[in-house]
Amino acid sequence: MLAVRLDPKLEERLARYCRRRGLTKTAVVARALAREIAGGVTPYEALIELTKNLEGSGNSRNSQNVSERLKRRLRAKHRR
């Protein structure tokens, strides 16, 4: 169990944040502490760091033009 004293303005901001997101104050504070203890790294930042050196196809545009490639394949298939 941990009790934390907050400035009234910060406590109100925390309460509004929690209401908007449907979270408890405990959950938000626990996440913030976990992030702080982990060196301030968000889960997204951690994912980027873990995956930045993975080998791929070498073509960074592949994920950007999936829709167009799929359309071309389907058109070609139905022309046969």
Image (cartoon, rainbow, N blue to C red):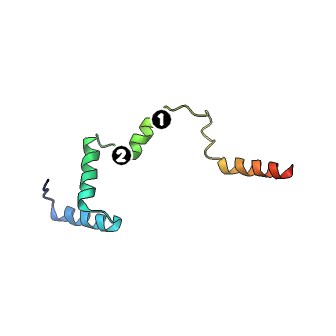
- Residue 45, position in %: x, y? 40, 43
In the shown orientation, is residue 72 left or right of residue 59? right
Q: Residue at x 30, y 63 (%)?
A: 23
| Element marked by disc 2 | loop
- Residue 15, position in %: x, y? 25, 66
Residue corresponding to mark 1? 52
C-alpha span from label 1 to label 2: 15 Å
- Residue 48, position in %: x, y? 44, 40
Q: Residue at x 62, y 41 (%)?
A: 61
Of residue 64 and residue 28, the one placed in the foreground of this image is 28
* Above or below 5: residue 50: above
Local packing at callout 1 (Cα closer than 10 Å; few below 14, some 14-19, many 20+) is: few
| Element marked by disc 1 | loop
Q: Residue at x 22, y 66 (%)?
A: 12
Type of amino acid under label 1: Lys
Q: Please identify the quarter of the rendering in which residue 57 is found.
A: top right
Q: Earlier in the sequence, mark 1 or mark 2?
A: 2
Residue corresponding to mark 2? 42
Q: Residue at x 66, y 47 (%)?
A: 65
- Of all residues, the one furthest to the right in this rendering is 80
